[in-house]
Image (spheres, helix red, strand yellow):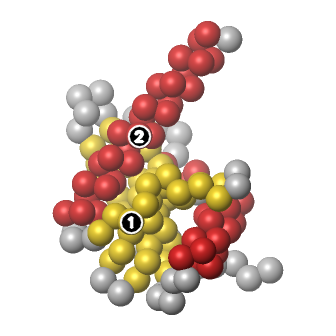
Amino acid sequence: MEQQNDRRKRHNELGKRGEDAAVAYLEGLGWRIMERNFVVGKFEVDIIAEDRDKIVFVEVKTRTDAVFAEPEWAVTRAKQRSIIAVANAYVVQRRVEREVRFDVMSIILDEQGESSIHHIPAAFEPIIA
């Protein structure tokens, strides 16, 4: 049980470091970060940012390597649906009347703390069901 808690703690710390790297990258592009870890019910989106005239919902996936798969492959159809649900709630709650976009950021952090960032703008479209 303790080993599982340690693994979860390391996983959460890695995710936080990846999100911090993503925020620094986006701010470097001139984006304004509006929210981090915005939660609606049991769903969450990592970053909500403003890119010129758009509101962008950003999912960040961080790994220490890409041996098994690139981090962005972890953004499954189910994960996309949950991000879209959060975006919908955000737009309604905040009365947003601007175009929205869904980006994914794939981050690999090595043992020395160096990061490799792959930003995928418009990584997926809202699903109408």
Amino acid type at circle 1 is Met
Q: Are marks 1 and 2 in contact (CB under 8 Å)?
A: no
In the picture, residue 91 is in which quadrant?
bottom right
Q: Residue at x 69, y 78 (%)?
A: 127
Amino acid type at circle 2 is Lys
Asked if residue 4 shows in the view, the reply is yes
Report the side of 123 relative to 126 (left or right): left
Mark 1: secondary structure: strand
Q: Quadrant of the N terminus?
A: top right
Give the residue at mark 1: 34
Nearest the viewer among 122 and 101 is: 101
Residue that sits furthest to the top in the current view: 2
Mark 1 to mark 2: distance in Å?
Answer: 17 Å
Q: Residue at x 21, y 71 (%)?
A: 30
Nearest the viewer among 120 and 3 is: 3
Please tell me the numbered disc located at residue 16. Answer: 2
Please tell me the numbered disc located at residue 97. Answer: none
Report the side of 6 relative to 53 (left or right): right
Q: Position of residue 58 (x, y in %)?
A: 46, 63
Q: Position of residue 121 (x, y in %)?
A: 41, 73
Residue that sits furthest to the right in the current view: 129
Residue 29 versus residue 2 in the image, above or below: below
Q: Position of residue 96 (x, y in %)?
A: 51, 83
Q: Earlier in the sequence, mark 1 or mark 2?
A: 2
Q: Position of residue 22 (x, y in %)?
A: 33, 54
Asked if residue 65 shows in the view, the reply is no
Q: Residue at x 61, y 10 (%)?
A: 2
In the picture, residue 120 is in which quadrant?
bottom left
